[in-house]
Image (cartoon, rainbow, N blue to C red):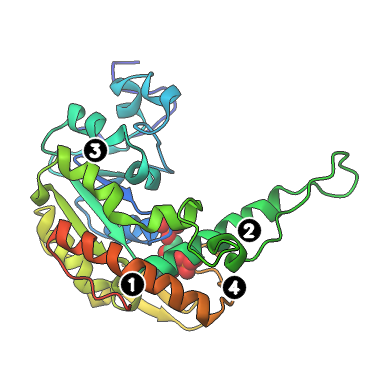
């Protein structure tokens, strides 16, 4: 086949695979999937399937930019290609690598109140551990970690366990600092993930502006699904909710522990606000 045409893959003429001009860099459990799917309502957006993990996984990064480009969807001239890999945000090597690809790339960082994010992370780790457990007849017995969120997040002496991954990831300023050493502040848009849940349209309008897209996404693209408890998307004739793993039930966490964590994060949140020059109004 002619260059650029994969055998068996049909695509429109005048389209090609482009390196992403915008990347959702994280934060995991803050609504990265919702954000990507909602942006895809826009006719000028093309999205990579799955999470590409090019910049954060050594084996992928070694395959080179051409491998990465081939992971991208076909797009028309003028369309913006986006991919999301939430672990980019917390992987130290990534900012430099993205910068080396395209120093004027636009980055989307979606954040959520850090304690809620940590609990969501715990809920996901628990559910993955449960599904990885062997079924009947599988030999090696795997002992499921049944520790509660409280046991993992708080140390026996009562202090916050900062090295527990769900807590460490929520200390946003530590990671953000690295990005701002490499990128200009105006290249990064901070999206409020709690607001994306409550009322997606205003956040999406901000992003349209940031990505210099024509205004397109509006109220007509969303309806609230009471069973799911979240907004779902509507585009012309089709409707779509995110899958069950998005919008999980969270375990009940002792209010004492929630309060302790909120106090712990107050100072870290302030450092994040100072760094990005925006106040996200998270409870203390
Ligand atoms: P929970 O499952 O803890 O509620 P990510 O895609 O980065 O893993 O983020 C998952 C989170 O996206 C979910 O966390 C959920 O709260 C949030 N989310 C935001 N908008 C959503 C929507 N419209 N439908 C489902 N989940 C949504």
Q: Which residue is mark 1?
A: 194
For the point 35% across and 73% down, which residue is it? 197
**Element type at mark 3:** loop
Q: Which residue is mark 2?
A: 127
256 or 225, which lies in front? 256
Q: CA distance from mark 1 to mark 4?
A: 18 Å
Q: CA distance from mark 1 to mark 3?
A: 26 Å
Q: Which residue is mark 3?
A: 20
Work out whether mark 2 precedes mark 4 in sequence or the reverse, and give the earlier one.
Answer: 2
Front disc: 2 or 3: 2
Q: Residue furthest front?
A: 157
**Element type at mark 4:** loop
Work out whether mark 1 precedes mark 4 in sequence or the reverse, and give the earlier one.
Answer: 1
Q: CA distance from mark 2 to mark 4?
A: 11 Å
Mark 2, Cα crowd under 10 Å, few <14 / some 14-19 / many 20+, is few
**Element type at mark 1:** helix
Mark 4, Cα crowd under 10 Å, few <14 / some 14-19 / many 20+, is few
């Amino acid at each position: 086949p002619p260059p650029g045409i994969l055998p068996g893959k049909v695509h429109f003429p005048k389209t090609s695979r482009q390196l992403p001009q915008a990347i959702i860099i994280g934060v995991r459990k803050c609504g990265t999937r919702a954000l990507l799917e909602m942006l895809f309502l826009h006719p000028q957006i093309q999205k990579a399937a799955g999470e590409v993990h090019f910049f954060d996984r050594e084996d992928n990064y070694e395959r080179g930019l051409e491998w990465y480009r081939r992971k991208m969807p076909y797009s028309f001239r003028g369309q913006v290609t986006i991919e999301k890999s939430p672990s980019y945000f917390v992987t130290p090597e990534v900012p430099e690598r993205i910068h080396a690809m395209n120093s004027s790339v636009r980055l989307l960082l979606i954040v959520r109140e850090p304690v809620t994010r940590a609990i969501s992370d715990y809920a996901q780790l628990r559910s993955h551990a449960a599904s990885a457990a062997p079924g009947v007849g599988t030999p090696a017995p795997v002992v499921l970690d049944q520790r509660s969120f409280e046991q993992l997040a708080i140390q026996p002496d009562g202090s916050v366990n900062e090295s527990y991954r769900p807590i460490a990831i929520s200390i946003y300023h530590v990671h953000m600092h690295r990005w701002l050493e490499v990128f200009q502040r105006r290249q990064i848009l901070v999206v409020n993930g709690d607001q994306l849940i409550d009322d997606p349209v205003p956040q999406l309008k901000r992003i349209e502006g940031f990505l210099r897209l024509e205004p397109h996404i509006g109220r007509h693209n969303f309806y609230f699904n009471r069973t799911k408890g979240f907004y779902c998307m509507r585009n012309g004739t089709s409707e779509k909710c995110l899958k069950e793993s998005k919008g999980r039930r969270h375990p009940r966490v002792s209010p004492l522990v929630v309060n302790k964590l909120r106090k712990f994060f107050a100072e870290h949140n302030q450092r994040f606000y100072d760094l990005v020059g925006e106040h996200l109004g998270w409870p203390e």
